[in-house]
């Protein structure tokens, strides 16, 4: 085996912990450094994951010559500046979704990858979920006929959270669309591409934070009905319908372990469990690309990320979702 690919992690919250757990499942991966603006938090995280180096600033980690690739799991509005800085230090970057706050920021990140000749990918882990991969394959092969309709939701009741939390603070790009709505948008984009027309409506707290958004994507021969929300819970299943069959994706659909396809009255079940929580599959893709000296993944490319955030920009414009820090 080639030498291990050595990881650094910044932004040491819940998602980073899940990611670090899955990193342990990858034989050619090693966590060598973690960083937080809170040194005690960095030390605590390090103790839980084999005692890698702990840093009190992100820049210290970027300057660590041992780190090959950085996983960025910080707040949404910091993704762009931190990714760009990491790439200036010649680090490969896997940045949590959403890639950035808007398409303009996302372009800066892609340009930094190209300029510094380092790999960069948005961490859209669902793209590498075995069930989603198989569904994409079945749809592309015409197994359910011409695609006509997609429905997908992503919700959790969060209105009892601290108003200053990352989820509800508009100054931190809080809101359901950026945190959860990008997943239903992703599914529609993955299977149908960019919509010809978007209808969208949002509801807001008095603070200006968006708490639920309903979307209809209009395609030439299909429609998608999508929803994200902090104001309620749903079963979080998804459905993909063609002229000759349907695919039912189990709850919670974006991290599903299997799905059902129904055609001509007959049903087939696909059991496709993830490795670990599911982050392992995107980690394997990062390793494959780095070892092949690629700057982007063919499965979730720079253009895919630019397209997706461009759709989100349009939804925000239509539904009036704004962040105070944006020019």
Image (cartoon, helix red, strand yellow):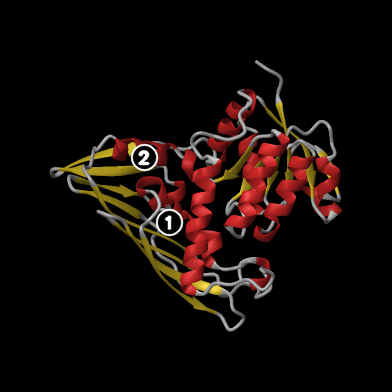
Is residue 13 rendered to the left or right of residue 62? left
Residue 39: x %, y % from top left: 86, 52
Q: How many marks?
A: 2
Q: Residue furthest top?
A: 1
Mark 2 packing: few (<14 Cα in 10 Å), some, or many (20+)? some
Residue 195: x %, y % from top left: 37, 56
Dots 2, 1 in contact, CB < 8 A: no
Q: Quadrant of the C terminus?
A: bottom right
**Upstream in sequence: badge 2 or badge 1:** 2
Judging by the rendered image, the residue that carries numbered circle 2 is: 136
Q: Is residue 230 visible?
A: no
Q: Is residue 143 visible?
A: yes
Residue 126: x %, y % from top left: 48, 45
Q: Quadrant of residue 13?
A: bottom right
Q: Is residue 299 above or below residue 109?
A: above
> Could you say whether the residue bearing mark 2 is in a helix, strand or loop?
helix
Tag of residue 3: none
Is residue 275 rendered to the left or right of residue 85? left
Q: Quadrant of the N terminus?
A: top right
Q: Is residue 268 above or below residue 253?
A: above
Camera-side residue of 288 and 237: 288
Tag of residue 184: 1
Q: Quadrant of residue 115?
A: top right
Mark 1 packing: few (<14 Cα in 10 Å), some, or many (20+)? many
Residue 322: x %, y % from top left: 59, 72
Residue at left offset 76%, top offset 43%: 86
Residue at left offset 36%, top offset 40%: 136
> Could you say whether the residue bearing mark 1 is in a helix, strand or loop?
helix
């Amino acid at each position: 085996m080639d030498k291990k690919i050595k990881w650094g992690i910044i932004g040491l919250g819940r998602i980073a912990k899940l990611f670090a757990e899955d990193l342990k499942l990858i034989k050619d991966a090693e966590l060598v450094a973690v960083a937080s603006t809170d040194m005690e938090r960095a030390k605590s995280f390090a103790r839980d994951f084999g005692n890698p180096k702990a840093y009190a600033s992100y820049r210290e980690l970027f300057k660590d010559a041992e780190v090959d690739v950085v996983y960025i799991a910080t707040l949404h509005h910091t993704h762009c500046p931190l990714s760009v800085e990491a790439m200036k230090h010649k680090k490969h970057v896997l940045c949590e979704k959403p890639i950035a706050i808007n398409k303009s920021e996302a372009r800066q990140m892609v340009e930094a990858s190209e300029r510094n000749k380092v790999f960069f990918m948005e961490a859209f882990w669902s793209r590498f979920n075995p069930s989603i991969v198989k569904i994409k394959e079945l749809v592309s092969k015409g197994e359910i006929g011409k695609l006509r309709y997609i429905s997908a939701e992503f919700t959790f009741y969060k209105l009892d959270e601290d108003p200053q939390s990352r989820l509800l603070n508009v100054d931190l790009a809080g809101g359901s669309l950026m945190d959860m709505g990008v997943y239903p948008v992703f599914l529609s984009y993955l299977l149908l591409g960019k919509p010809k027309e978007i209808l969208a409506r949002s509801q807001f707290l008095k603070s200006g934070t968006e708490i639920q958004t309903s979307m209809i994507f209009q395609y030439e021969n299909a429609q998608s009905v999508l929803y994200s929300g902090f104001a309620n819970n749903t079963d979080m299943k998804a459905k993909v319908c063609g002229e000759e069959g349907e695919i039912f994706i189990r709850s919670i659909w974006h991290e599903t372990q299997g799905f059902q396809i129904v055609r001509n009255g007959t049903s087939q079940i696909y059991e496709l469990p993830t490795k670990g929580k599911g982050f392992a599959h995107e980690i394997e893709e990062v390793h494959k690309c780095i070892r092949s000296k690629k700057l982007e993944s063919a499965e979730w490319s720079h253009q895919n990320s630019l397209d997706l955030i461009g759709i989100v920009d349009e939804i925000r414009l239509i539904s009036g979702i704004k962040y105070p820090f944006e020019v």
